[in-house]
Image: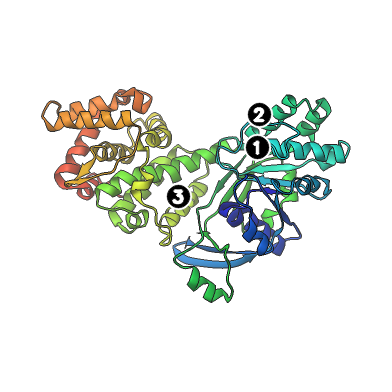
Amino acid sequence: MQFGGGNFLRAFVDWMVDILNKETDFNGGIAIVKPTAGGDYSELKAQDGLFTIILDGIKDGELVAEKSLVTSVQKVVNCYTEWETYLDLAKDPDLRFIVSNTTEAGIKFNKEDKFEDGPPTEFPAKLTVWLHHRFRYFEGDTSKGCILLPCELIEDNGDALKKCVLDYTDSWQLGNEFREWIESANHFCSTLVDRIVSGYPKERAEKIQEELGYEDELLVAGEYYHSWVIQGPDTMQKELPFSQTDLNVEFVDDLVPYREMKVRILNGAHTAMVPVGYLAGIRFVKEAMDDETVSGYVASLLLEEAAKTLDFPEDIKRKFVSDVLDRFRNPLLKHQLISISLNSTSKFTARLLPTLKDYYANEGKLPKRIVFGLSALIRFYKGEIDGESIPLKDDQKVLVFFASQWIKYDSNKLSLKELSQSILSNTSIWKEDLTTFDGLVDSVSRNIEEIDKKGIRQALINESLDG
């Protein structure tokens, strides 16, 4: 059972189940449940759950394209108009897995929800009613519990979903026996998902449908790369035979290191790339990867600095970095640097500052590429380059502070070193005083001076930061 039939789940989970069915003896079908009131999935129903997925990307340096008809969806239920049909799904003895993607705001408890509502508002409330229906129908049989695999982009999504279900159980006074069944017979697994799904390929749809030989209103395009990391018991691997396929699915005991690797490498690369690329006159991620100097800088930052702070085998780290760089080279994903630049200061604090601190502690010196990225970020937040305005988007207090410091510098009220000192010591932005790192103020002020005097590419080359 799947809560949500949007582009991501169709191009991720439904596609994976289709491959399991074709390559193993899994033989699974999906019942998609509409979790929100808006829309009715009429197109999905009209096409009997069938849709085509288009996957493009770079694999091992080569451009790949894959088209496949996904046939795993067998039923589509709108619980707002088919509440009893939704509840009847609980009577299926073979239903074992529950997947969801109801956005980051979807997993929450709402005290206004009532058990008698048909349906209640929140997704966890609908789920709790369904689980109780199943508990009652099978008379508490522990073999009829479910494995829940939430895909919402929040930390510990499995734990968060379980807490909501238990909160509704208590609020609605559903009894200790049901609570015990939830605890013992069901597995709420936290997961980490990764695939860029761009949705309906409007610009290419006509050409694609000519090649396919049929029309498909539900065409969904995404990148070839995919990753699903699931924190759950070993027994689950037997029930979900991903190991018998080439799908990039891992079952782990602890999700935290994998989340950290994604944040420090994938997200960290984006955050470092934005100001460096933009100041170099680049506007898209793909253009940054085509630029030898900028792409060399990003690659060396990941391999020589970020990867060194992660506790994974060297081959796994290098493979992850290689996959990330291949994804950035995808010519069909048009990612604007300025879009990624939203709230860059808080992104630096979350994604690159932990790496800087660990590298500094482990190596006894500053990571010069991350420091250069920080320098470029401060220069980027001046809001202009070569007479062109930069459309900065961040908390207004942050923007006002940066503007005031740069105005003081331009009017000779601050030297470049004093500017760097003032900005790096602002604990409301960085959550700590960065001037405590020995040599950081001097390095940042020197980098900014080089960027303005010689241009950012030459500054990179002079510092030998591009690999």
Q: Residues within 10 Å of mark 1 (few under 14, many from 20)?
A: some
The kind of residue tagged 1 is Thr
Q: Nearer the viewer, mark 2 or mark 3?
A: 2
Where disc 2 sits, the SS reads: loop
Residue 214 placed where, x, y %? 59, 74
Q: CA distance from mark 2 to mark 3?
A: 46 Å
3D distance between C-alphas at marks 1 and 3: 41 Å
Q: Which residue was labeled with disc 1?
A: 121
Q: Position of residue 382 (x, y in %)?
A: 23, 37
Rendered image quadrant of residue 440: top left
Residue 251 located left or right of residue 307: right
| Scheme by which the image is coloured | rainbow
Q: Earlier in the sequence, mark 2 or mark 3?
A: 2
Give the labeled residue for mark 2.
112
Whether the residues at callouts 2 and 1 have beta carbons within 8 Å, the answer is yes
What amino acid is labelled 2 in the image? Glu
Pick out the residue farthest to the right.
139
Q: Earlier in the sequence, mark 1 or mark 3?
A: 1
Total number of numbered discs in the rendering: 3
Q: Secondary structure at mark 1?
A: loop
In the rendered image, residue 88, in percent from the top left (x then y), is placed at: 81, 47
Residue at mark 3:
321
- Measuring 24% from the left and 50% from the top, which residue is drawn there? 280
